[in-house]
Image (cartoon, rainbow, N blue to C red):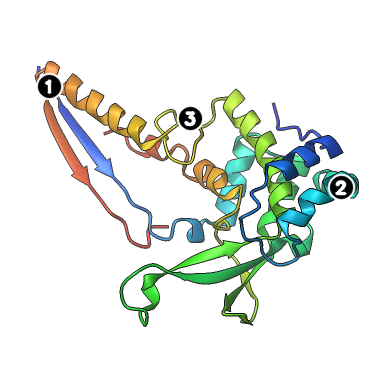
């Protein structure tokens, strides 16, 4: 019996910056993160503001409407939760 | 079972302050880590109140959510914007609060085995070597069974 084995490699571009907050929150809810804790994450993600600073010159603050903050502690874990189960999308 | 958030204590906060790296740069609304370490016994008690209130009310203080981004030059032409990597700096108090949340969340996730077992990045005790081993193992298995191996590599741009 001859079977096929295939590998698919994906590379996300600007992955952290493009995380959709609503999808992330519903994913957290799915895993049992609800109530107060969910509210905490809503607050954590909402109204995040960032400004660029070049050689002591600070530029205007902008609100981040999507994405998890790079360089943060929770960012990688939230991203993992976000993409968790992606392999279930296909049964190749 | 839903995720239950355990309150923090001044002892836990003191411990987290001790673990902070002095040489790391901090963002807006911070105090130097060196000074924070000196006053950790005094500051951990008011921080306990702030952090426990944050957990109980589900509110992250606004000042914790301001990120300072500066461009770090990588290599190549200095006039090309894409040769810079953005570095985000966050308030040191936010980092401590995030660490407290991270510890609680990872415990919940690990205990319930929520993360896919072939996920090797961004996890403690996991590395790229595990990913390679897993692939090599799959290849060997295929060869041993006299099967075909088909491999495709994709790169998605603007995928999300």
Q: Is B132 positioned to the left or the right of A27 in the image?
A: left
Q: Is residue A43 visible?
A: no
**Mark nearer the N terminus (1 vs 3):** 3
- Judging depth in this view, the residue of A45 and B102 nearest the camera is B102
**Mark nearer the N terminus (3 vs 2):** 2
Residue B15 locus on image (x, y percent):
75, 38
Q: Is A76 positioned to the left or the right of A15 in the image?
A: right
The quadrant of the image that shows the N terminus of chain B is top right
**Mark nearer the N terminus (2 vs 1):** 2
Q: Which residue is mark 2?
A: B53
Image: A50 above or below B2: below
Report helix, strand or loop for mark 2.
helix
Q: Chain of mark 2?
A: B
Please report the residue visible at 71 percent of the width from the left and 45 percent of the height from the top.
A38
Q: Residues within 10 Å of mark 1 (few under 14, many from 20)?
A: few
Q: Residues within 10 Å of mark 2 (few under 14, many from 20)?
A: some
Q: Residues under labels 2 and 1: Cα distance?
A: 58 Å
Q: Which residue is mark 1?
A: B143
Residue B109, quarter of picture = top right
Residue B124 locus on image (x, y percent):
51, 33
Q: Chain of mark 3?
A: B
Front disc: 3 or 2: 3
Residue B16 locus on image (x, y percent):
73, 41
Q: Are marks 3 and 2 on the same chain?
A: yes
Q: Which residue is mark 3?
A: B125
Q: Chain of mark 1?
A: B
The quadrant of the image that shows the C terminus of chain B is bottom left
Residue A73 locus on image (x, y percent):
61, 48
């Amino acid at each position: 019996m001859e079977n096929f084995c295939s590998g698919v490699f994906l590379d996300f571009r600007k992955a952290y910056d493009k995380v959709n907050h609503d999808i992330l929150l519903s994913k957290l809810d799915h895993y049992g993160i609800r109530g107060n804790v969910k509210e905490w994450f809503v607050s954590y993600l909402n109204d995040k503001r960032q400004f660029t600073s070049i050689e002591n010159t600070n530029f205007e603050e902008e609100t981040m409407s999507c994405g998890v903050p790079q360089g943060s502690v929770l960012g990688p874990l939230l991203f993992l939760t976000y993409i968790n189960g992606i392999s279930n999308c296909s049964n190749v | 079972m839903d995720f239950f958030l355990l309150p923090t204590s001044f002892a836990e906060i003191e411990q987290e302050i001790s673990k902070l790296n002095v040489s790391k740069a901090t963002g807006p609304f911070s105090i130097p880590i060196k000074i924070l370490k000196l006053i950790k016994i005094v500051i951990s008690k008011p921080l306990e109140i702030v952090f426990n209130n944050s957990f109980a009310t589900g509110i992250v203080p606004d000042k914790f959510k301001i990120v300072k981004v500066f461009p770090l030059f990588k290599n190549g032409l200095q006039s090309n914007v894409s040769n810079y990597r953005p570095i985000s700096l966050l308030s040191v108090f936010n980092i401590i609060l995030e660490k407290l949340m991270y510890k609680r969340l990872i415990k919940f996730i690990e205990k319930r085995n929520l993360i896919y077992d072939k996920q090797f990045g961004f996890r403690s005790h996991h590395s790229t070597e595990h990913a390679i081993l897993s692939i090599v193992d799959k290849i060997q298995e295929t060869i041993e069974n006299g099967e075909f191996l088909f491999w495709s590599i994709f790169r998605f741009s603007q995928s999300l």
